[in-house]
Image: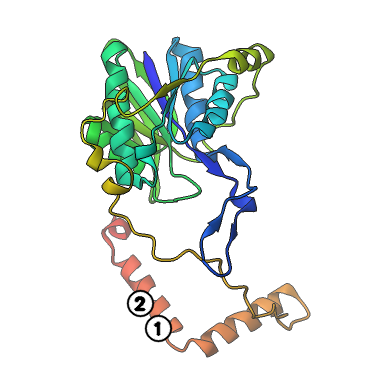
């Protein structure tokens, strides 16, 4: 079994600032980290490696500096690392990114067939959650999003069973491989790097694939040329001017009563809307059953 984990090196969001004049993100001096959501994908892939003897390849599209993130992933136990890096990829949005990564995965599939592609739910710098689904479409693979648990894999039938978080509960889905899986946050806990893997990662020669090595056929679909997304403005949220207010009442029950009375007084339609909602729930098919 061969698993590819797509990761991204992102600036640490806790230290990002926005320029007050240009309204652009100031990246100078901000440390880069592996996208936190991608770590859940990496850990799940490594668990499958431990259980089924799978081979795990980490892949990323980014500048040469992203090699640091690749070696970090190797120190956790990944077998191989490929950095898709070329000047023509600069300025790529999610559409162009999924095109380049899908081309690289197809190229890798020619020498070692890929069974599962793991990604994080989203990235902390873009928050679009579009690359995973984009990869599935371009690779013509089954898509499993918001997965919280891998229940099992049947190598003979090439079937994977997962649990995914859905509105109102958890879905259990069975799918054929190859497939693309986006992992939900909190689904596992990243392991610590071992000393042997840390030494191996430090000596490891990360593969750098340019556009030719990655099998990019149409350069108009990568980088700025292949990115229809336009960011009009980036800005920091304005600080709230409203101060906290203490609700009067000698006991918690009295405070709750005072708060409810105030809500109904400030929102006259609230009571009618709540009654209408409760009435609709009482007459719903679920309530009838």
Camera sees residue 27 = yes
Asked which secondary structure carries label 1, the reply is helix
Quadrant for residue 72, please give it: top right
Expressed as whole percent of the image width and height from the top left, the position of residue 224 reads 32, 48
Depicted 132 relative to depicted 67: above or below:
below
Q: Which residue is mark 1?
A: 272
Camera sees residue 173 = no
Q: Nearer the viewer, residue 80 or 90?
A: 90
Expressed as whole percent of the image width and height from the top left, the position of residue 100 reads 31, 34
Residue drawn at 57 percent across, 29 percent down: 68
Q: CA gap, disc 1 to disc 2? A: 6 Å
Expressed as whole percent of the image width and height from the top left, the position of residue 243 reads 69, 79
Q: Nearer the viewer, residue 57 or 268?
A: 57
Expressed as whole percent of the image width and height from the top left, the position of residue 268 reads 46, 89
Q: Residues within 10 Å of mark 2 (few under 14, many from 20)?
A: few
Depicted 135 relative to depicted 50: above or below:
below
Residue drawn at 31 percent across, 70 percent down: 280
């Amino acid at each position: 079994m061969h698993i590819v984990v797509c990761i991204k090196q992102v600036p640490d969001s806790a230290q990002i600032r926005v320029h007050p004049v240009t309204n652009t993100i100031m990246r100078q001096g901000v440390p880069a980290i592996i996208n936190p959501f991608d770590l859940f994908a990496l850990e799940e892939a490594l668990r499958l490696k431990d259980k089924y003897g799978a081979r795990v390849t980490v892949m990323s599209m980014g500048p040469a500096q992203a090699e640091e993130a690749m070696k970090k992933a190797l120190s956790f136990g990944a077998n191989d690392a490929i950095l898709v890096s070329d000047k023509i990829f600069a300025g790529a949005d999610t559409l162009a990114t999924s095109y380049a990564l899908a081309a690289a995965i197809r190229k890798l599939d020619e020498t070692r067939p890929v069974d599962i592609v793991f990604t994080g739910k989203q990235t902390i710098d873009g928050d679009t959650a579009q690359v995973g689904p984009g990869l599935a479409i371009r690779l013509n693979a089954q898509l499993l999003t918001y997965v919280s648990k891998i229940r099992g894999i049947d190598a003979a039938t090439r079937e994977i069973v997962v649990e995914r978080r859905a509105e109102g509960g958890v879905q259990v889905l069975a799918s054929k491989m190859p497939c693309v899986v986006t992992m939900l946050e909190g689904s596992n806990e990243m392991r610590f790097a071992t000393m042997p893997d840390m030494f191996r990662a430090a000596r490891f020669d990360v593969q750098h694939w340019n556009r030719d090595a990655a099998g990019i056929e149409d350069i108009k679909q990568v980088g700025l040329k292949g990115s229809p997304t336009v960011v009009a403005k980036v800005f920091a949220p304005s600080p709230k001017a409203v101060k906290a207010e203490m609700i009067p009442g000698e006991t918690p029950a009295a405070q709750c009563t005072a708060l409810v009375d105030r809500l109904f007084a400030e929102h006259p339609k609230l009571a009618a809307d709540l009654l209408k909602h409760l009435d609709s729930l009482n007459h719903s098919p679920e309530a009838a059953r």
